[in-house]
Image: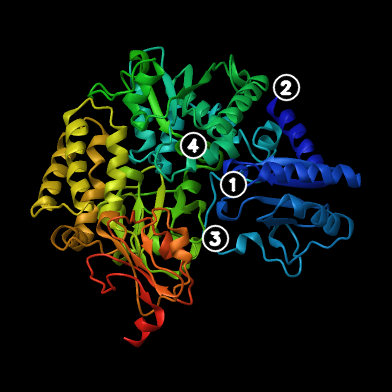
Amino acid sequence: MKFEETKKKAIEEWESTTQKKVCIRVGTATCGRSSGALDVLKAINDELSRQNIDANVMEVGCLGLCYIEPMIDIYKPGHSRVIYANVTPDLMPQLIEDYLLRNNPRPDLALGTIGEGNIEGIPRFSELPMIKPQVRLVLKNCGHIDPVNINHYIANGGFGGLIKALKMKPEEIIEEVKKSGLRGRGGAGFPTGTKWGFCRSAEGVEKYIICNADEGDPGAFMNRSLLEGDPYLVLEGMVIGAYAIGATEGYIYTRAEYPLAIKRLEVALDRMREHGFLGEDILGSGFSFDMRIKQGAGAFVCGEETALMYSIEGKRGMPRPRPPFPATSGVWGKPSNINNVESWADVARILDQGADWYASFGTERSRGTKTFSLAGNVKRTGLIEVPLGIPLRQIIYDIGGGIVGDKEFKGVQSGGPSGGTIPAKLIDTLVDYEHLAEVGSIMGSGGLIVMDEDSCMVDMAHYFLDFVQKESCGKCVAGRVGTSQMMNILERIIQGEGQPGDVEKLESLANTLLATGLCALGGTAPNPVLTTIRYFREEYEAHINERRCPAKRCTALTSYYILPDKCEGCGICLRDCPAEAIQGGKRMVHIIDQSKCIKCGTCFDVCPPRFNAVVKVSGEKVEVPPEPVPVKASKKE
């Protein structure tokens, strides 16, 4: 069957299931499922059956607003789609009855609308603060199509890039990718077209392409969400890349911790084979190519391309020196090209819409858009896609809604555990490869972890270095010994045992790692330490010289006290203290036995706000009675 006929049938199915009858979309990506979306899905199906309502119910990917999952949207023919957030199973019977039977879309519950026409009292989804600044190129289909229904993908422009590519010469495709300005979205930012050119010109008949889906950064979920919401886009990009490079086989390397993404990839691969987009003689072009999924065990180091290739071969995932580079000697010793999930998705969009179109987004040296996982102490957490060159301030405040509790913004960790911490004073930094590098950070795969005024930067450096140190393969001295030595120093500092000169030792070790690390993991591991020293050196000095944590986060340097002039002797803290460290009777000023206190903070949390009698201090002395005294006596004093 010719592609034109396939597309015509796909559009007919799309229209019949999503436009000619009631269609209810339920976000069942990982974020939705963790919030109860499957229970909502069941409640919807049960109520539709009970009311004998003819409707299509679709499972879709994530729209990006993870902080208000579960989300659904309801479409009635002739009306806009109405999106609802924070839904529950108990709400479904009433909502279905109100909207589908009584034509009341419940503006009081609705988040926004999508499609032609307006509904009074409900804003347009595209105008919502979190959505309006975004430009969704690779996330275009996520949350809108059934991710495993190949006809939904085709009806929405899917495989248009592949059809164009198969009519071009491989060298022309590579030039088009070069012209687009696409740089690797896995973190390194190397020009994608140039990388393809190396592999294309490498000697050898047997070549491989690989999708690096081994997303392991704490707080990062961009690749997982894309694979769960639109796997065909990534796979289409891989087929285009294989044709351009001359590869006959490919691998999708992902971690076993992504079961939903793997399941949807497996279905997508089967459907592509059935429809002639994979396998022998793809779409009658004479080009043959197939790929398989390789599940990794979750080692962070396997995100490094040479370690990843060893893992594919069944060996221990450890980086190797380069050269030779993978373009000439990769998996099984054959020429190989590795790109990350988002890079492959971008390729499909570039070939479909054209290099000039893609290059119109972003900046002169950082073209296109970038997906980010927005996490941490920000009000609106989720998955976003923005043009490169957007100010960091706009991401945190316009898209993210600012800091939770309206606290002060202190910094943001970009690029994962190997990235750097950008301080509040640099909040107007442009988010692209060049400007992030200038302030000591990296793009990475796209994780952004926002920190508020209560974050301790020494503790944050310790947290990220601890992750990298534990994930180090141990092959090189820098990764094995250097990170361990740095961890020992940071441990001392946060335990209140820091010594003069420790900061200088950290800097010296960090610079050694930067120069001698075998792979990017070891070579970038010191970034969190170096940037926190660079921008928050006074916090390190306070920990070392004053035995004080300014943010009051480091347990060894903090204490809890009960203020005698505010304590009413209610006994709540005494009752809830898990260590039985609080003494005092009814109407007696309570005191905390510091030798028993485990510094869990329970007393601070449970003390009634009207009293605020418990304080958390670091490096400060608080005068308290040596033993419990009557409340009245304390107030008289």
The residue tagged 1 is 140
The residue tagged 2 is 1
Give the CA distance from mark 4 to mark 3.
Answer: 26 Å
Q: Nearer the viewer, mark 2 or mark 4?
A: 4
Question: Marks 1 and 3: in contact by CB < 8 Å?
Answer: no
Label of residue 130 in the image: 3
The C terminus: image quadrant: bottom left
* Residue nearest the viewer, comparing 87 with 193: 87
Under circle 3, the secondary element is: loop
- 499 lies left or right of 215: left
Q: Quadrant of residue 480?
A: top left
**Dot 3: within a 10 Å radius of its alpha carbon, few (fewer than 14), some, or many (20 or more) residues?**
many
**Dot 2: within a 10 Å radius of its alpha carbon, few (fewer than 14), some, or many (20 or more) residues?**
few
- Residue type indicated by callout 4: Val
The residue tagged 4 is 347
* Residue nearest the viewer, comparing 186 with 420: 420
